Image: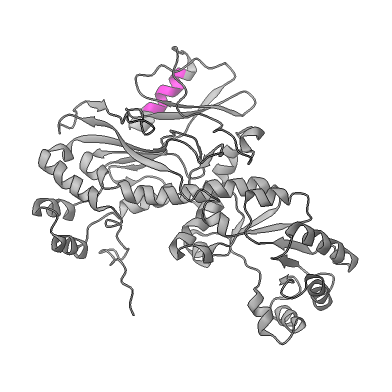
Amino acid sequence: MTIWTAPPGPDGTPGTALLTDHYELTALDAARRSGIAEHRATFELFNRGLPVGRRYGVVAGIARAVDAVARFRFHDDDLEWLRRRAFLTEGTLEWLADFRFRGNLTGYRDGEIFFPYSPILTVDGTFGEALVLETVLLSILNHDCAVASAAARMDVAAGDRATIEGGGRRTHPEAAVDAALAAYIAGIDVTSNLEAGRRFGLPTAGTTMHAFTLAHRSEADAFAAQIDAFGPGTTFLVDTYDTETGIRRAVEAAGPGIGAIRIDSGDIGEEARRARALLDELGATGCKIVVSGDLDEFKVADLADAPIDRYLLGTRLVTGSGAPTAELVYKLVAIADDAAVDAPMRPVAKTSPGKGHRGGRKVATRVIDGSGHAVQERVLVASDVPDELPTDHFERGLQVPWMKAGEPQRPFDADAARAHHLTVRNELPPEALRIDPGPAFLDGNRGHGPARTGANREAHEDQKEVLQG
């Protein structure tokens, strides 16, 4: 049986244009008929609130989203299938045949911290070309931001102990690759996913499996085979039968220079304590202890006093640890009333209860106090007059150009994104990093107030000029 996959485009890479909803193309068809499809428009991608109890979110997937937009093409096979479906006019099919995004993408960096109403991604283009990007952008960013947000909390809970992403068997195979990248950006040290390692240059590692032990006639034979292949510095899975006996056999086989043991069952904290005591008694004082077993940030925090060196994180990590989506939405915030290139833009906004948003294109900055801690996120439209800042405070611009006139502007580097995340995470004071339930640390809607003057106002104007190109 052959499972059909999307055909590649002329450059050999798979297209992304049909990773969309039916209603986006029917709305495009109607907008072309009314003429509004060619009006300049601005959409913003944000969330109205963090998952209950979360104090911050982490951006991931921006570079993947930019790549998806660059590959958003309707190839001949796509158009033929749409033509057979017979729900679009021939004029719209011809429009799609010539489609490529020619607008601008501006957004937060991968690894950045976000809060409610942070304009994570801004799309400037015609109404028609921006409209059809909704689903593919939300699909990528809702997934990656959810994983990164969970990963950051787990990394904070782990402290200085190493963390390993190993959730590839608990999600869709392509989602596993993207989850590994999102987790690495948010601070997880290594992944077991080899495709993620190849595609994104991530460090990879693995331990061993119960099946390997079970396949040998005895546990001792399995450990001897491991040493023959990898040397004594490998990691031994010691709880296939009896953990204490497994530890003794592993040390007997590898000697006091044994690299690590892994525990995957029982009361992890108590098992780790017993293991440490036994390893030390046997002279294997340098042996590391790796634990796994459906760990999340709360379980990791509960294990803070246990003698554990590395956490292997799986299901809860790659599924967002109870928040499988970042709850991002994609909303029109400004549109021109005619198709002229220089037509003025007017702000538009939804006002329905619980689902409203503020109209107008936003500029976002993070306010940092004299101690280097974030104290405010300002999300302002052009008509806002920001508050005067204390003299020892400064603003850091949060948005950068990702695509101009349809051309990507920034190379992506996973290590740079990870470094950026760790830097901006350190801007948050300790209370913002707590994993117990609490309100969002910064409110992305704050920042409206009396006029400010001087260098801070000039910095704000400079940021607007950069973003508006």
Provide residue 118's location: percent of width, then percent of height: 44, 34
Q: Nearer the viewer, residue 462 or 70?
A: 70
Task: Judge from the rendering whether residue 92 lies leftward or rightward of residue 316; answer left or right.
Answer: left
Q: Which quadrant holds the N terminus?
A: bottom left
Task: Judge from the rendering whether residue 252 lies leftward or rightward of residue 297; answer left or right.
Answer: right
Q: Nearer the viewer, residue 141 or 50?
A: 50
Prevalent SS, magenta region: helix
Provide residue 126's location: percent of width, then percent of height: 22, 39
What residue is rendered at 45% in x and 12% in y? Answer: 450
Decide whether residue 461 is among the magenta residues.
Answer: yes
Residue 327 visible within the image: yes
Q: Nearer the viewer, residue 53 or 246?
A: 53
Q: Nearer the viewer, residue 392 or 327?
A: 327
Task: Judge from the rendering whether residue 164 lies leftward or rightward of residue 250; answer left or right.
Answer: left
Provide residue 294's location: percent of width, then percent of height: 62, 59
Q: Residue furthest bottom?
A: 217
What residue is rendered at 70% in x and 65% in y? Answer: 265
Q: Give, as a single range, the part of the protein colored magenta.
A: 457-464
